[in-house]
Image (cartoon, rainbow, N blue to C red):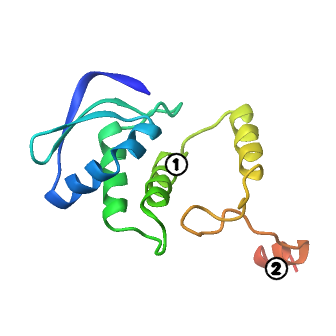
Amino acid sequence: SQQLLFPITVDLTLPQFALVKEHIEWFERLGFVMKLFGGQTVVIDAVPALGQPHNGETLFQQIVDELEHPPVADLNPEERVALAFASRAGITKGVPLSQQEMNALMNDLFATSMPYVSPHGRPILVRMSMEEIERKFNKR
């Protein structure tokens, strides 16, 4: 976890607050250090240390939103928290990476059991023949 200089106060709806209260241990396992405060408020003292800059409040709110409205059906609550975290905490498009970071990312990807799809089931990479590539770039 990355300790915050100033705690973040997040006001939630009653259903969101109930979800956070129910799954607080999972948020803590991800690296959030927080206290439930009042009827609908969460005070966040630390956020996950992800190795890249991120907005802890936005990350927290996005995870809560995905818990409340899961994009993938048939997941238990713990899997929904993990899915939300994985999809929100990952490297985003447009962020430059060093060669070492790219190599580590590919090694980590191929060490997983499902390297070809994102947590939401979208393709990460596809296999194409040379003929397909040439056809797509009008080389034939």
Query: What residue is at 28 percent from the left and 56 percent from the top?
Result: 19
Q: Residues within 10 Å of mark 2 (few under 14, many from 20)?
A: few
The percent position of residue 34, horizontal first and vertical second, equals: 28, 34
Residue 85 vs residue 91, the one in the foreground: 85
Left or right: 98, with 82 as reference point = right
Which of the marked residues, 2 or 1, is nearer the chain's N terminus?
Answer: 1
The percent position of residue 20, horizontal first and vertical second, equals: 28, 50
Query: What residue is at 74 percent from the left and 35 percent from the top?
Result: 99
| Residue position marked by numbered label 1 in the rendering | 92
Kind of residue at badge 2 = Arg
* Callout 1: SS: loop
Residue 50 in the image: above or below residue 89: above
Residue 140 in the image: above or below residue 62: below
* Callout 2: SS: helix
Residue 76 in the image: above or below residue 109: below
| Residue 100 location, quadrant | top right
Kind of residue at badge 1 = Thr
| Residue 36 location, quadrant | top left
Residue 135 is marked as 2
Residue 120 is marked as none
